[in-house]
């Protein structure tokens, strides 16, 4: 049993300990608050620094002698011009964008002409441009089709009269949407502060195209071009072009196509979209190969493109990607020698190509001999 004196001493000691603990706790709390403020300040400073850096890069380009002489762009004006023509009058000129649902086969008999099924770099081809379309021009059932959704709804499949009205009213024709969009999930609705891309929107679906060519200015400062035709034909004149077979064209000119829904979520950030289709995990894993044409809203199921047959390699799946990934892409485009400002926004989408104008030479990795493909009609 303790004496009264020892009890008093113990009580005094306890009071001192409690006091010291209280002071330590207050100090720790103050340090934590200071650290949080400093971290928040650091994050804000980092964001501001990144913004300043991108601005300074653009200013640096404007003052750089590397970009001063327009004659240094040896691909400028290299486009070989072929006007659109009546689809019914074209022979062996399959069109895009088409149905890329697994198993689909078109009605245009391509004979012995095959798409290039190798990775493009293995065929000495390089990306010569990147651009994208509002909604998807291609159709993949269950991925990007009439059952998808976005901030402004979707397109039915297909409504030719409705599409014609939109054109007459001067609207940007849009394509199909993916199935990711959820208006109750903030990553699909929270606005993003775009610095470089124009007119883009979180939650929307976009189909990205990377035209490739073996006669582009591969590995040089002139590799990327707007319009993409300048890049595709950079080192090819008309006389040389006219000596090429249709298989030569399909083997040496191609496009990567990949469809994305934009999200405001940095866990979906990818830093290097300018290089071509993203191949990682399930991205670029399920690819549809066929021969087709150039796309865009100047073509439909009456007027067709004569830039055919070229190879298309299209990812059948739709993927989510961060808005910052696209903005980084647009910054990279601004850094090219050629002026790519005409491709910093979404282009309109061609209406889905009728079966009668789609090639029948689809290649599926699951059926290497191509003889087991079924004649699917969506």
Image (cartoon, rainbow, N blue to C red):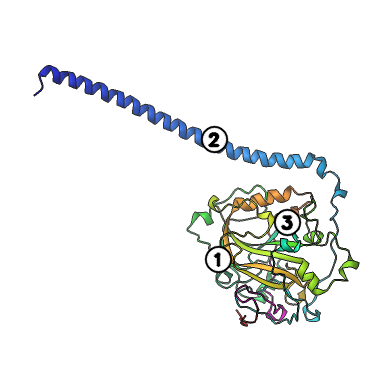
Residue 337 percent coordinates (x, y): 79, 49
Between label 2 and label 3, give the one nearer the viewer.
Answer: 2
Between label 3 and label 1, give the one nearer the viewer.
Answer: 3
Residue on which the image places disc 2: 42
Give the structural element (helix, strand or loop) at label 2. Answer: helix
Residue at left offset 67%, top offset 71%: 289
Residue 109 percent coordinates (x, y): 73, 82
Labelled pair 2, 3 in contact (Cβ < 8 Å)? no
Residue 98 percent coordinates (x, y): 67, 73
Residue on which the image places disc 3: 343
Q: Would residue 76 appear left or right of 268 to someone viewing this image?
A: right
Q: Is residue 19 above or below residue 42?
A: above
Q: Is residue 186 above or below residue 120?
A: above
Q: Which residues are magenta?
A: 348-368
| Residue 101 location, quadrant | bottom right
Q: Quadrant of the C terminus?
A: bottom right
Q: Is residue 268 above or below residue 145?
A: above
Q: Main secondary structure of the magenta part?
A: loop
Residue on which the image places disc 1: 149
Mark 2, Cα crowd under 10 Å, few <14 / some 14-19 / many 20+, is: few
């Amino acid at each position: 049993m303790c004496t009264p004196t020892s009890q008093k001493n113990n009580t005094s000691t306890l009071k001192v300990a409690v006091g010291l603990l209280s002071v330590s706790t207050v100090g720790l709390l103050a340090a934590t608050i200071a650290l949080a403020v400093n971290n928040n300040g650091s994050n804000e400073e980092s964001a501001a620094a990144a913004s300043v850096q991108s601005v300074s890069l653009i200013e640096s380009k404007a003052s750089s002698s590397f970009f001063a002489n327009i004659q240094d762009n040896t691909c400028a004006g290299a486009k070989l011009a072929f006007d659109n023509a009546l689809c019914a009058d074209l022979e062996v000129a399959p069109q895009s964008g088409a149905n890329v649902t697994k198993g689909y086969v078109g009605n245009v008999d391509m004979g012995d002409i095959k798409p290039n099924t190798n990775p493009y770099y293995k065929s000495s081809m390089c990306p010569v441009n990147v651009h994208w379309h509002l909604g998807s021009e291609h159709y993949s059932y269950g991925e990007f089709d009439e059952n998808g959704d976005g901030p402004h709804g979707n397109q039915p499949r297909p409504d030719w009269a409705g599409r014609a009205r939109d054109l007459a009213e001067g609207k940007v024709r849009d394509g199909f949407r993916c199935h990711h969009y959820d208006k109750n999930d903030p990553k699909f609705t929270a606005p993003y502060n775009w610095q470089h891309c124009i007119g883009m929107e979180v939650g929307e679906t976009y189909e990205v195209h990377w035209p490739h060519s073996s006669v582009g200015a591969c590995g040089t400062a002139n590799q990327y071009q707007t319009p993409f035709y300048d890049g595709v034909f950079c080192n090819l004149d008309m006389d040389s072009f006219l000596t090429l077979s249709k298989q030569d064209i399909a083997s040496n000119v191609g496009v990567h196509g990949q469809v994305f829904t934009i999200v405001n979520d940095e866990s979906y950030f990818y830093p290097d979209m300018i290089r071509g289709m993203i191949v990682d995990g399930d991205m670029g894993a399920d690819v549809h190969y066929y021969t087709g044409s150039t796309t865009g809203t100047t073509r439909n199921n009456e007027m067709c493109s004569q830039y055919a047959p070229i190879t298309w390699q299209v990812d059948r799946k739709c993927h989510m990607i961060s808005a910052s990934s696209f903005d980084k892409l647009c910054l990279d485009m601004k850094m090219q020698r050629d002026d790519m400002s005409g491709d910093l926004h979404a282009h309109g989408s061609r209406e889905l190509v009728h079966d009668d104008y789609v090639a029948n030479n689809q290649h599926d990795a699951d059926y290497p001999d191509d003889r087991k493909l079924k004649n699917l009609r969506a």
